[in-house]
Amino acid sequence: MTLFAAEDIRIESLRQVAARMLIAAQTAPKARGQNHLATAFAEGDTIAALSQKMAEIGATENNPTFARDAENIRAADVIVLLGTRISPMNLTKCGWCGFDNCAQKPDATPCAFNTGDLGIALGSAVSVATDNRVDNRVMYTVGLAAMSLDLLGPGVRVAYGIPLSATAKNPFFDRPK
């Protein structure tokens, strides 16, 4: 007789959900059909490296949010990482970034379409997690650490992390301030 307990399949199930989240992000609608997303998921020692980097940022910047989140993500078995490169749409009239058009936008200013696409992709990804009853939370602190570690590759300028858990209590809510 073969029997699998929830604990026996938890990690593999989270990996499968993370993979589906990456696909959902990639297939989410994009401005002009252009994909500037970078997607991946992390486990084990990479989560430990993210946590360490977040703690370092928290200490350096005197920002307790990073320290709290650094500890919090240690409860995650998998973390989905989503980011975007900044590539203007070359529009002659827009203004969403604060400049009249793409030609006037400085390189350091994010394109509103790229960040908007990232937001839509995040929504698609977390809906997959929710549909599979996997606890999750979108965290900018994880994204900043991932960029600092260059986990999503060169050129990624905005990123988020989504830690995943499948336990009796969602570890990403009811956190200390």
Image (cartoon, rainbow, N blue to C red):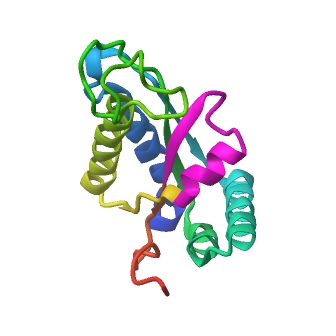
Q: Quadrant of residue 90?
A: top left
List the single residue furthest toward the bottom: 176
At 38% from the left and 19% from the top, the residue drawn is 102
At 71% from the left and 69% from the top, the residue drawn is 55
What x and y, as percent, mark residue 99?
A: 35, 29
Q: Quadrant of residue 23?
A: top left
Compared to 54, does 24 lie above or below? above
Q: What's the magenta region?
A: 141-161
What x and y, as percent, mark residue 152?
A: 61, 35
Compared to 166, does 43 lie above or below? above
- The foreground one among 10 and 169 is 169
Asked if the stretch drawn in magenta spans residue 143, the answer is: yes
- The foreground one among 9 and 18 is 18
What x and y, as percent, mark residue 142?
A: 57, 56
Q: Is residue 135 rendered to the left or right of residue 93?
A: right
Q: Is residue 90 rendered to the left or right of residue 58?
A: left
What x and y, as percent, mark residue 139?
A: 47, 59
Q: Is residue 44 rendered to the left or right of residue 15?
A: right
Compared to 10, does 169 lie above or below? below
Asked if the stretch drawn in magenta spans residue 148, the answer is: yes
- Whether residue 81 appears in this view of the structure is no
User: How many dots with numbers?
Assistant: 0
- The foreground one among 115 and 94 is 94
Q: Is residue 73 rendered to the left or right of residue 104?
A: right
- Whether residue 50 appears in this view of the structure is yes
